[in-house]
Image: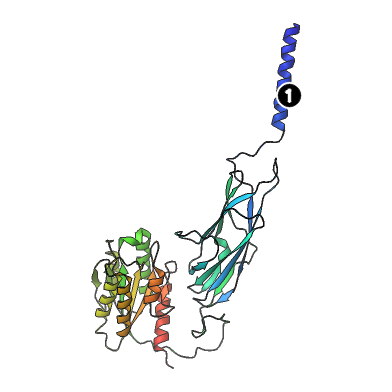
Amino acid sequence: MTAARALRLAGLAALCAVGLSAAAGPRQARADAPSPCRIQVQLTLSDKLVCPFTAVDARFQLRASCPAEPGGPARVRSVELIHSLPAGIRHSAGSGPMVSGQPEPTWRIEPFPAEGLSLTHQLRPILPGSYALGEGLRLRIEDDRGRQAEQSAALPAGSGGLTVSARCDGQRRSAVYLPRLEQPGCVPLRQPADIVLAVDRSTSLGSRGSNDAERHARAFLDRVTLSRDRVALVAFDQRVDILAPMGSPRWRLDAAIETLTAAPGTEIDRAIDAGVALLADSGGRRRVLVLITDGVQTGPRGRNRVLEAAEAASAARVQILTAAVGRAPDLGLLEAIASNAQATVVTAGFEGLGQAYAALGEQVDCAR
């Protein structure tokens, strides 16, 4: 072997050794790799046993942790916290940097403080039941190296559990109710009722909202005793159509629900007026109007006209139940026109409308 060739081979070996040494040495974190940082979450509730419609404060404590890496640990730059609420629980108010216009309560914190922070939002339970509020927490993280990650909050077992009692004293809704074993103080008379079931068919509901409206209507009919109570079905958008007259049998009511077809516009006041007119000849029967709608009034007369129509219905002794459906229901309006605080139900509990109807009868017809 010539001296020149030996020298070239020695140089090549030295380059390979340097390459192997570099490969074996510390690597810089890739900017497109997921962030190894995590957010530790603690959730505490102001109450764990409440009545329906009683406000509950949920407090989150968030702290960041990032493992050691070559060049030192990263820092969390921003965090987005999303709280997916279970069926029967509604967000009422929140503190901190909440993101408006989101379907679920969402906070975005940027920059994220090194010492962590606390967030609070107020919940309003609508339906009785047991709820694991911590199961719906999701986080999106971005660190100071541009890496992102998503995680579900891993909470200690049993934290975030809320029980909403089905048996509460209606005069003390702001207090926590401890179940009692004695018999109720009154017995419902079960006065027969005439019911107008008014279903919103407007395009603002969207396909899912329309499906939910139909499911609410069928679930409600399942809870009504048609041998005692009479039902009429109307559909509304910009106008109101009577699809099944008062006293229709179940098969006809089901067939009428099948004919619902989406149309533009929503004039809730017309639906209320039509319901009151249909109930005018109810005689001694209880008068009930059930509105299944997103509550988004698009008629030229606006929300005030809806409130006026509801006041006229109350003067005519018509009780109003409302069920919220659709992508962004106007819950404030639906609660305002309902006969009482328990007479508004949310989409995700299709049996809730029938339960609210039964409760409304007990409140009005209870023998004192």
Looking at the picture, how far across and down is residue 106, in whole percent?
Answer: 51, 59
Q: Is residue 266 left or right of residue 125?
A: left
Mark 1 residue element: helix
Horizontal arrangement in the rendering, residue 78 relative to residue 300 (left or right): right
Location of the C terminus by quadrant is: bottom left
Q: Mark 1 highlights which residue?
A: 17
Query: Which is more toward the observer, 326 or 350?
Result: 326
- What's the residue type where badge 1 is placed? Ala
Give the image quarter of residue 315.
bottom left
Graded by Cα atoms within 10 Å as few (under 14), some (14 to 19) or many (20 or more), the crowding at tag 1 reads few
Q: Is residue 360 above or below residue 61?
A: below
Q: Nearer the viewer, residue 230 or 154?
A: 154
Residue 276 in percent (x, y) is at 27, 79
Residue depicted at 52% across the width and 89% down the height: 183
Dividing the picture into quarters, in which one does residue 132 lie?
Answer: bottom right
The quarter of the image holding the N terminus is top right
Q: Is residue 12 left or right of residue 175?
A: right
Does residue 228 appear anywhere in the picture? no
Percent position (x, y) of residue 320? 35, 78
At which x and y percent is residue 281?
24, 84
Q: Residue at x 35, y 74 (%)?
A: 221
